[in-house]
Image (cartoon, helix red, strand yellow):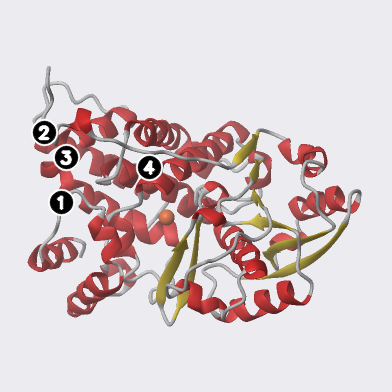
Amino acid sequence: MDPKPNHPLMKIFSYQAPTRLVYGINSIDRLKEELKKFEFKNALIVTGSTVCKTTACDKVREALNSIGKYSEFNAVRPEPETSVLAGIAECVRQSPPDLVIGVGGGSALDMAKVASMLVANDKDPIKYFKGEPIVKRGPPIITVPTIAGTGSEVTPITVIVDDNTKMAITHYTLYPAMAIIDPVLSLTVSPQAMASAGIDALCHAIESIMSVDSNPVSSALAFEAISNVDDFFERAYCNGEDIEARNGLSLASVLAGMAFSNTGLCLPHGIAYTYAVQCSLPHGASVSLAEPYVVEFNTPAIPEKIDLIAAALGIDTSCMPASDVGCEVADRITEMLDIAHLPQTLDELNLDESDIEPMVNDLLKKHARFIAKNPRKPSREELIGLYESMF
Ligand SMILES: [Fe+2]
């Protein structure tokens, strides 16, 4: 066999996942031992005002106390706005930490990455979200997630909201050096927060497989992530004390994060960014609303990939025409949205069809990077049709 240059066999890919994982039930108790591997004198905990009062933070403090000095920045809010950047910059530039530990949901972990970056890069923080190059690596970052789904514990990505627009930095210096993933820490999360974050992991995994930059390694990880969400999402939602289910979602979050940090995400995340902030919708809930519609839209372009996603969801596709497989996958996602009472249409967000034009303009102007990763390139008219179908 002599494959042609554009044959899939001839595709060269790279894959990296440099974050050391310490994973498992009660793994937080290993933190003290793990911290000894980092030479630090002045650590910084980055967290939010609620998480800072939890056992998770107490355990981090306890481990740090026995080794060295530390301080805290605990003013991170969900979906952080640019106003938080000045506080983080002031905190790290007054007393530069040599280790940063993010404890909490995706936003706290994202802001821990920003704190590390600002130790070594002295420009106005917002500039780095607007394209200013990061010139130096900051101190090591440790992530301790207290909710499963965002994947931020293993990605080099940080997201902030500026004037209703989400902006992100993706840079190799933001990869956490270590992630302590203890599913026990996610037991206290409310069912709604759990559902929004858990469904985000499913969307990350599906979009990683659909991405034009998917590869066999990322797809294997994403397949496992989808399968875990399929097995455990309902159980975790219905019973907050089901540790096996929480463990399944913690694993899904990590696997999906390792997959999409290498492949990027596609159209559903881009579409979600056009209404999530103005509708005050949690990130995962905004993305999962768009996911089934985009899966159906993409199916004609990537039937084999949709087959793979269907298999991960346990759908028997034998004797099924390719076009039906996409519908089955979309239906399975919608079933999960039903279970967790997550929104499924744009009407539920009190949007109306006159909002379509501005949302499409916003998507094309500010979030085109997600379209670039999408396997089927939508025309403007097709995007309008896609949004119309979401009403
Ligand atoms: Fe996401």
Mark 3 Cβ and ligand 1 under 8 Å apart: no
Mark 1 Cβ and ligand 1 under 8 Å apart: no
Front residue of this view, candidates 59 and 127 = 127
Question: Would you name the residue on which mark 2 appears?
Answer: 322
- Percent from the top left, x then y, of residue 259? 41, 41
Sequence-first tag of 2 and 3: 3
Tell me the tag on residue 376: 1
Ligand 1 quadrant in view: bottom left
Circle 4 — which element?
helix
* Residue 157 shows in the view: yes
In the displayed structure, would residue 41 be above or below residue 31? Answer: below
Judged by depth in the image, the label closer to the viewer, 2 or 3, is 3
Question: Would you name the residue on which mark 3 appears?
Answer: 302
* Residue 339 shows in the view: no
Sequence-first tag of 3 and 4: 4
- Give, as a three-letter code, the residue at label 1: Arg
Q: Residue at x 50, y 53 (%)?
A: 172
- Percent from the top left, x then y, of residue 208? 34, 44
Tag 1 and tag 3, C-beta contact below 8 Å: yes
Circle 3 — which element?
loop
Mark 3 surroundings within 10 Å by alpha-carbon count, few (fewer than 14), some (14 through 19), many (20 or more): some
Tag 2 and tag 4, C-beta contact below 8 Å: no
Judged by depth in the image, the label closer to the viewer, 2 or 4, is 4
Mark 1 surroundings within 10 Å by alpha-carbon count, few (fewer than 14), some (14 through 19), many (20 or more): many
Q: Is residue 108 left or right of residue 63?
A: left
Distance between mark 2 and mark 3 Cα atoms:
10 Å
Circle 2 — which element?
helix
Distance between mark 3 and mark 4 Cα atoms:
15 Å
